[in-house]
Amino acid sequence: MDNLMQLFTEAGTLMLAGMVFVFVFLGLLVVFINTVLVKLAQTYPDPVVQRKPQHNSINKKEAHDGVSPSIVAAISSAVTQYRQQHSKKK
Amino acid sequence: MESLNTLWLSTGLANFELGQVIMMLVGCLLLFLAIAKNFEPLLLLPIGFGAILTNIPVAGFSEVGGLLHYIYYIGIDTGVFPLLIFMGVGAMTDFSALIANPKVLFLGAAAQFGIFATLFGAIALNAIPGFEFTMQDASAIAIIGGADGPTAIFLASKLAPELLGAIAVAAYSYMALVPIIQPPIMKALTTPEERKIVMGQLRPVTKVEKIVFPLAVLLMTIFFLPAATPLVGMFCLGNLMRECGVVDRLSSTAQNELINIVTIFLGLGVGSKLSADAFLNVETLGILALGAVAFSIGTASGVLMAKLMNKYTKAPINPLIGAAGVSAVPMAARVANKVGLEANPHNFLLMHAMGPNVAGVLGSAVAAGILLALVGS
């Protein structure tokens, strides 16, 4: 029983010390964020990235005609090939 | 005839003991929970399979020369696997919500009360015949309240390796049960009006802040709690790799391939500790019960702390986000968001709850460091 009481006392001390330490440690972190990090954020803000409008000829063409030139080229060559094969058979 | 007899004696059927059969069924139950119920499948699946493998008679998976024996001693006994997992978790963690609203760190601190209160519970169980928990055992059990798998495994491997299987299973099972355990406690401790509180928008956080934060946490741990530096150090390394933006390949490896590989081995290693003689005893029941108590007290103290802060701070704080202080990232934050949405369908608390959630990870690592420093020697 004495042993149990001793363990209880030890657990109580551990709880008190542990909770105080966790609060102090994370509290210091709060202070650090509120002072140093906030200052850092003001001194070194993220650079504003401006997105350039895309100057892509293929995209422009696509937007205009609805079909990209590469697809048109592929279809034309396929049609030409098909016609050649057909004419040979005749 | 004699060779037939020898053959029979080398079969599993002739060598099965009741305890092994029961533990294989426990392994199957874990597989069922992982596959059918989707409870922490990434860990419960390898743990369940490891439990089946380790209880196979004659094969000797967990004896010297067996695969699981080496996996356990290389990765878990040394503490390497949980630390590698912690690095991956660091690489997956975004501290923006915490840096934008730092006072939620107190919620993460308050939720650690679950750990220290459970210490009492574990010691109190010694009054019942059959329980003989030392202070080391009690500390390793109490860390289940931190709701952080790697931290629990790390601490158990250092303080009470014989209880590791039960502690890991309890920790991961309760983490999977967060959506069931937490809401009733959250609702019981808050009024509908409190649950409806809308929190202000968070400020944007700059890249410099995100880079300096893990370094500052590490520096503070070095100064005040070197015992926690293995956990906090690996966590901060992972987070720095994520935020610095110059080692995307390493960051990606830490949070994908590496963590996946280690998870397989960690699960198998923990499963190897689920042998009949180590698991089938009254202490395991005590650990499972204490784990639930630890979780509940942690949730309650987080919510109560948030209520207290809401009374005394200018910016309103919804008490529900206090429950996310028990780590269990990101499940606890999702639960806070869900319970908040039930009270007010236009109130999204997820980002606000992520702050105390990641604060809980730091808090439980610090608590583990304190237990190691005070009890480990």
Image (cartoon, coloured by chain):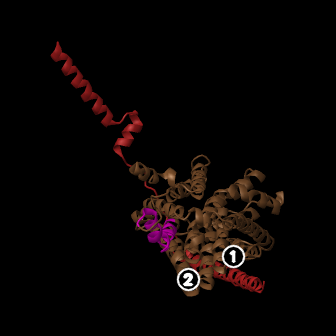
The picture places residue A76, in percent across and down from the top left corner, at 27, 28
Query: If the image is split into quadrants, where does the C terminus of chain B sit?
Result: bottom right
Q: Main secondary structure of the magenta part?
A: helix
Kind of residue indicated by mark 2: Ala
- Report whether residue B9 is seen: yes
Q: Which residue is mark 1?
A: B132
Q: Nearer the viewer, mark 1 or mark 2?
A: 1
Tell which of B127 and B295 is nearer to you. B127
Answer with left or right where residue B41 lies relative to residue B116.
left
Mark 1 nearby-residue class (10 Å; few <14, some 14–19, many ≥20): some
Chain appearing in red on the rendered image: A
Looking at the image, the residue that sits furthest to the top is: A90
Reply yes or no: does residue B70 show up in magenta: yes
Residue B371 figure quarter: bottom right
Q: Secondary structure at mark 2?
A: helix
- Chain B appears what colour? brown
Mark 2 nearby-residue class (10 Å; few <14, some 14–19, many ≥20): many
The image shows residue B81, relative to residue A57, as above or below, that is below
Answer with left or right where residue B178 lies relative to residue B18.
right
* CA separation in Å, label 1 and label 2: 27 Å
Q: Chain of mark 2?
A: B
Q: Chain of mark 1?
A: B
The structure residue drawn at horizontal position 58% and vertical position 57%, both measured from the top left corner, is B23
The picture places residue B160, in percent across and down from the top left corner, at 59, 75
Q: Which residue is mark 2?
A: B227
The structure residue drawn at horizontal position 53% and vertical position 71%, both measured from the top left corner, is B210
Total labels: the figure holds: 2
Kind of residue indicated by mark 1: Glu
Magenta-colored span: B65-88
First-in-chain label (1 vs 2): 1
Tell which of B353 and B46 is nearer to you. B46
